[in-house]
Amino acid sequence: MKLTKTLLATSYLTLTATMAVSDGHMASEMTIVSWGGAYTASQQAAYHDPYMENTGIAIINDDSSSEGIAKMRAMNEAGNITWDLVDLEAADAIRACDEGLALEIDHDADLAAAPDGTSASEDFGDMIVSECFIPQIVFSTTFGYRTDMLADGAVAPKGACDVFDLETYPGRRGLNRQPIANMEWALLCDGVAYEDVYDILETEQGQEQAFAMLDTIKSETIWWSSAAESIQLLADGEVFMASSYNGRLFAAIVEQDQPFGMAWNWQMFDLDGWVVPAGLSEERLARTMDFLNFATDTQRLADQAKYISYGPARASSAPLVGKHATLGIDMAPHMPTDPNNAENTFVNNYEWWADYRDDLDAKFQAWLAQ
């Protein structure tokens, strides 16, 4: 019964949105929620600015994606939806869909086909991890380090496991204040085989093993909550190494000429994309769907890669990735999927985290408070 009601509601919203588009009756303003910094800047250049130029509407950026699920729950509970479109990582998009916080999307009806006529669902393929999820990018969480803080003669760090080597690489670390990636790195760097990580992490013993490994660096770790913080910690020299998103590190190194290096080993591949909040008015939903049709076509997704080193989620976009918009450098070697950067990687298990996130969030925060 619940599923039937959801499908009926979704069908009704899609129908009314289509009617509103045909009538030209769409909202003249949108609030789009994302992650701020270099990432939002890339969206602004690739999507928002051309869409505003084409339509004359106003787009307001809100940098609250790191709190996306919690705020969507609160808005839903209050019956006051103030966001029109939300950028979420795949695992959180699955949760939003499962909880009824986001609308299901008909990818082929709502999104543009590829230039050769390939349907959107086929073009995005396995990137569509939820009926509510509209993929944008493939990115990775990896590590940056201060090249000017390396000891004389020291070999540059290669990746995540060097974070746990305080003898070779002394100094503070910067890690995200959440369990995702940190728990996997702790097990991988404690000798657990990649294929066994999530099976072990499901158990109390596996979680205790991960926390014990993290205990070895806890006193030397500064915990960040937003991607901008991780880059700032490195820029200020407060940490020697910090986890961050590869595109943020790219922007700091290539565009800002920061003395950072990249340590790619055991980077975590992830997906990021849009969800449409449930409960939008007819006019706002129509505007949001019109924007999505524009912003997720083959050329637009390729355009974002001119500004930040994240891979586009559409297969048809990949061949169109070229040079940086202002620096003129080839972007392909800076992508997390480049073979030189992807010797050892792990893929975020989106469905696993959708099931275990709330429980491990609580345990992780309790561990931090100890």
Image (tube, helix red, strand yellow):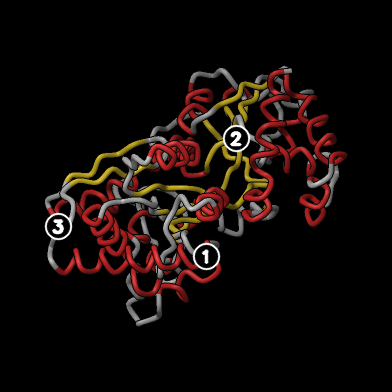
Residue 100: give x, y in percent of width and height.
48, 53
| Residue that badge 2 annotates | 243
Q: Which of the two labelled residues, at mark 2 and mark 3, occupies the earlier sequence position? A: 3
Q: Nearer the viewer, residue 78 or 57?
A: 78
**How would you rate the neighbour count of disc 1 (Cα within 10 Å): few for under 14, some for 14-19, many for 20 or more?**
few
Indicate which disc residue 54 carries: 3
In this picture, residue 169 sits left or right of residue 36: right
Indicate which disc residue 205 carries: none
Report the mark closest to the observer, 2 or 1: 1
Q: Amino acid at mark 2?
A: Ser
**Quarter the C terminus occupies:** top right
Which residue occupies 79% across, 47% down? 202
Measured in 3D between alpha carbons, the distance from the residue under mark 2 to the one under mark 3, in whole angstroms, is: 38 Å
Q: Amino acid at mark 1?
A: Leu
Residue 180: give x, y in percent of width and height.
65, 41
Residue 228 occupies quadrant: top left
Task: State if disc 3 and disc 2 touch (CB < 8 Å).
Answer: no
Which residue occupies 69% across, 19% down? 369
Measured in 3D between alpha carbons, the distance from the residue under mark 3 to the one under mark 1, in whole angstroms, is: 38 Å
Residue 285: give x, y in percent of width and height.
28, 56
Residue 157 occupies quadrant: top right
Looking at the image, can residue 136 be seen? yes
Q: Which of the two labelled residues, at mark 2 and mark 1, occupies the earlier sequence position? A: 1
* 313 w.r.t. 358: above or below: below
In this picture, residue 19 sits left or right of residue 188: left
**How would you rate the neighbour count of disc 2 (Cα within 10 Å): few for under 14, some for 14-19, many for 20 or more?**
many
Measured in 3D between alpha carbons, the distance from the residue under mark 2 to the one under mark 1, in whole angstroms, is: 40 Å
